[in-house]
Image: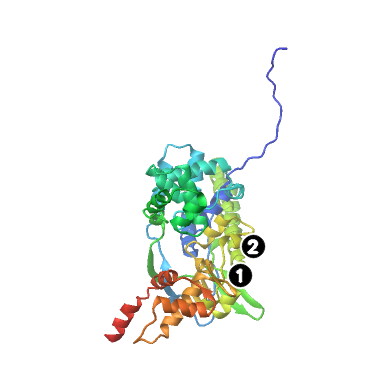
Amino acid sequence: MRPELQQAPSLRQHLVMTPELRQAIQLLPMTAAELEAYLVREAAENPLLEVERSNFELPSGLSFGVLRAPCVAEPADPRADLRLEVNLCRAPYAVRQAASMLVDSLDERGYLPPLDAVLADELGVSLALLWQGKALLQSLGPAGFAAENLGESLLLQLAQANKVSADTERIVTMYLREGCPSADKVAAILDLPKPQVQKVLAELQNCSPSPGGAYAARHEVGTVYPDICIVKTSGGYRAKVNQPGVNEINMKRVFHELFACADQGTKEYLRARYHEGLWLARAIKQRLATLERLAAALIKFQYAFLEHGKASLRPLTMSAVASEVGVHESTISRAVSHKFALTPQGIVPLKNFFSSHVHSLGGAVASLAVKERISQLIAVEDKKSPLSDSQVQDLLTAEGINISRRTVAKYREALSILPRSHRKAWARG
């Protein structure tokens, strides 16, 4: 039988990056101020658009003029150069597009969220393209950059120095999984020579845990315009999102008025601008809905903090909030980026609602709550005989908080509190 060519219909599923989805991803990381500036620029290019300012109201007794706090400002976006490098690469357009979307998913350490089917579906690209986009980012950044976790990052850094083997991977994986045990314990568990393990662990000391630190935002002091206001009402807490928008009613009215008396070329132009405006309006609504669900989840998980302050913060991961909101973890990461909430406890960066934990007799305690307790203990210490890190450790242990002296020192330094010897010398002076 001679083979013949035939046409037959078939069904298959594939992900498409729609204009609405692309804009929604672009708008979500923006603060309210950045979004308004963006809409003003869009309105200058689209005669149909009219920016609708938010009717955001502060609680009685507060004004924007007094809302000053350490904030994240980016006069020059530290990731702009990375996006430019991506766009200048000779990689296929689809790969460059995937890499550009992943840039906004990088955290302050230069890590990516887990690349899985859920993230691919959310971004509207295939998982294969995400992996190619990840590889492109890794080729542009420092060794260990754009990894999905610390272990992968360390192995990438070792690989650049040609210091990776099957045993090296086993050592690094076990070392991190077991909480950084001694070389003796690693060697015993893996049945490897101790000198070999010591060599790998020594090489790890030269690796950076945050290879993407260069892409983190710079900190400076400025006026904070909260993106979310959380207020207490008789029925509990409620959140109001500060967000400008597009006046769709006026856009539609102006479109019909201009369209009625336009020539064919102008009509095509107006149709294009009208659809662009609709896409933008839908993306803004999606951003608002996401932030409202995020705020509701934060109120639910951190109710005690809103009532009592930092010491009552509970451990919380972006993964847990993502499950509550019904989105991917990377969406939560983008949503909290550089945003602040005005709460009964003051101005709070949204990222502060998320915290790792330490163990206590009553269960896990948020690391930010532990830092707050350390700050409180040192604030009331005898200034002539300040507390040592070991003494602070003992006091926390007595309260049921299990923490090492080294961690106390790390938290104290993060709080910009001087060591005991310096505090004592300062008191004498």
Q: Are marks 1 and 2 in contact (CB under 8 Å)?
A: yes
**In this picture, is 354 found above or below 234?**
above
Identify which amino acid the numbered label 2 is placed on: Glu
Residue situated in front as seen by the camera: 197 or 419: 197
Residue 417, given in percent of the width and then of the height, sits at: 37, 75
Residue at left offset 53%, top offset 70%? 366
Q: Does residue 151 appear to the left or right of 119 in the view shown?
A: left
Identify which amino acid the numbered label 1 is placed on: Phe
Residue 209 visible, this angle: yes
Residue 129, given in percent of the width and then of the height, sits at: 54, 41
Farthest residue toward the top?
1
Residue at left offset 42%, top offset 43%? 139
Residue 85 visible, this angle: no
**In this picture, is 85 found above or below 281?**
above
Residue 213, given in percent of the width and then of the height, sits at: 40, 57
10 Å crowding of disc 1: few (<14), some (14-19), many (20+): some
Farthest residue toward the left?
429
Q: Mark 1 points at which residue?
A: 301
Residue situated in front as seen by the camera: 66 or 294: 294
Residue 41, given in percent of the width and then of the height, sits at: 46, 56
Q: Which disc is residue 324 wearing?
A: 2
Q: Does residue 382 appear to the left or right of 46 in the view shown?
A: left
Gap between marks 1 and 2, in whole Å? 10 Å
Farthest residue toward the right?
1
Query: How is the model colour-coded?
Result: rainbow
**Of callouts 1 and 2, which one flags the residue occurring earlier in the amino acid sequence?**
1
Tag 2, which secondary structure?
helix
Tag 1, which secondary structure?
helix
